[in-house]
Amino acid sequence: ALFAAKILGPRIGRFYDAEGNELPEPHNFPPHSVALQVLGTFILWVGWYGFNPGSTLGISASGYADVSALCAVTTTLAAAAGSVSAMFTDMIMTRKHTGETTYDITMCMNGALSGLVRITAGCSVCE
């Protein structure tokens, strides 16, 4: 991947113009399909329920159902907390920069994924 990135180089129009001159400030590309991003995030979120609670490898033994339930709850709370915190952090940063208050759903979805990644290792021991 590193070699491919080096060969391809940066996106034309993002950091450099068509002639190769560096832009004074990187150009932000708008998201292509926010609806598909939200759908993909929720598909991953539901898939995390198969991974985190499913990692108990069996609910037949005594106490495994409690561990699995704890995994499901902490997975939900981590994704929700990541989503809300990323949305409000982006809102505060945007308000500071532009003076306007806006809520960005794409940052909300990125926060949900970061919360899911964060909780994966310790979902069975967090209370």
Image (cartoon, rainbow, N blue to C red):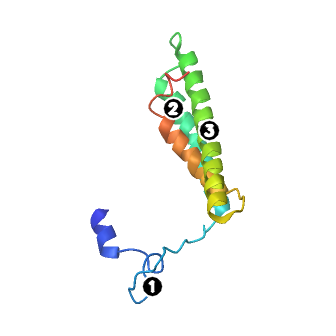
Q: Is residue 39 visible?
A: no
Q: Earlier in the sequence, mark 1 or mark 2?
A: 1
**Circle 3 is placed at which residue position?**
81
Q: Amino acid at mark 1?
A: Asp
**Circle 1 is placed at which residue position?**
17
**Circle 2 is placed at which residue position?**
52
Number of marks present in the image shown: 3
Q: Residue at x 51, y 28 (%)?
A: 123
Q: Residue at x 48, y 73 (%)?
A: 26
- Tag nearer the camera, 2 or 3: 3
Percent from the top left, x then y, of residue 88? 65, 48
Residues under labels 2 and 3: Cα distance? 17 Å
Q: Residue at x 40, y 90 (%)?
A: 19
Q: Secondary structure at mark 3?
A: helix
Q: Amino acid at mark 2?
A: Asn
In the image, residue 74 sits, relative to residue 41, either above or below, namely above
